């Protein structure tokens, strides 16, 4: 059974998929394509939306990270990561939805990309973009704080797909000093992060970004 993942090393969504592959101890081939530089016909063939990651499992092609995680969760043996009970199951879906629709852009594409990533490449930093990202990230973290405090998911106990979806996003966001400060103000979420960041699978994918940290450094993420 051949598993192949097309992605970009620094892409946060690629990291989420790689985290799941690591959690399930699945061996896979990694093909690096940068979706931010031009149009790759190889990527369009796999995914007309031209986003990464894309999974290929014996010819079954799947894009959209939450779908990839759900697929790997059931197609490969391992500790169940989708709760059976209605309430934690709903919370898991809620976290993933909040992150996808409201978290990714401000936390990663605005705050992390500008405060942390751009300087690594000597690019100018747009403070207005950071300010807007921080403003938009605050309610996202508040919503997640409530969920972490309730402890149905994000509880530092049983890992679910919500943890895997959120971990790499927080991992990037908290690299910005402002992100770290906002996170620190959300106590339950901070506790969760302290637990999650130590997971061996996360440590395996959490490679430094920047010109020294990648074989072929992309200019954007
Ligand atoms: N809905 C997609 C989003 C993936 C995504 O936005 N990936 C970024 C990299 S982190 C990407 O490929 N962006 C290229 C683009 O938007 O043109 C998923 O869940 O996989």
Image: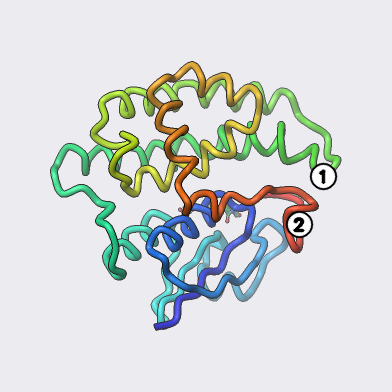
As drawn, the residue found furthest toward the top would be 185
Q: Nearer the viewer, residue 142 or 63?
A: 142
Q: Which numbered tag is attached to residue 46?
A: none
Q: Residue at x 38, y 28 (%)?
A: 144
Relative to residue 91, is residue 68 depicted above or below? Answer: below
Task: Name which quarter of the figure residue 87 lies in.
Answer: top left
**5 left or right, relative to 143:** right
The residue sitting at 64% across, 36% down in the picture is: 112
Residue denoted by label 1: 121
**Where is residue 153, by image quadrant?**
top left
Disc 1 from disc 2: Cα separation = 9 Å
Looking at the rendered structure, which numbered label has been put on residue 217? Answer: 2
Relative image position of residue 198 (x, y in whole percent):
48, 42
Give the residue drawn at x 31%, y 69%.
76
Could you say where residue 205 lies in the image, as x and y percent from the top left? Answer: 55, 54
User: Mark 1 touching mark 2, by CB under 8 A?
Assistant: yes
């Amino acid at each position: 059974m051949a598993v192949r993942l097309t992605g970009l090393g620094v892409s946060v969504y690629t990291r989420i998929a790689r985290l799941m592959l690591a959690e399930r101890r699945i061996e896979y081939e990694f093909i690096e394509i940068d979706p931010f530089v031009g149009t790759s016909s190889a990527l369009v063939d796999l995914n007309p939306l031209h986003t990464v990651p894309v999974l290929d499992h014996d010819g079954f092609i799947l894009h959209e990270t939450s779908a990839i995680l759900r697929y790997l969760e059931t197609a490969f043996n391992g500790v169940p990561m989708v709760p059976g009970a209605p309430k934690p199951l709903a919370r898991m879906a809620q976290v993933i939805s909040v992150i996808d629709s409201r978290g990714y852009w401000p936390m990663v594409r605005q705050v992390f990309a500008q405060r942390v990533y751009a300087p690594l490449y000597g690019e100018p930093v747009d403070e207005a973009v950071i300010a807007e990202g921080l403003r938009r990230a605050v309610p996202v973290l508040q919503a997640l704080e409530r969920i972490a405090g309730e402890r149905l998911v994000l509880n530092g106990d049983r890992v679910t797909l919500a943890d895997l979806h959120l971990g790499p996003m927080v991992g990037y966001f908290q690299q910005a000093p402002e992100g770290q400060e906002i996170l620190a103000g959300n106590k339950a979420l901070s506790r969760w992060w302290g637990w999650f960041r130590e997971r061996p699978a996360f440590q395996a994918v959490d490679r430094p970004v920047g010109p020294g940290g990648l074989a072929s450094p992309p200019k954007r993420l």
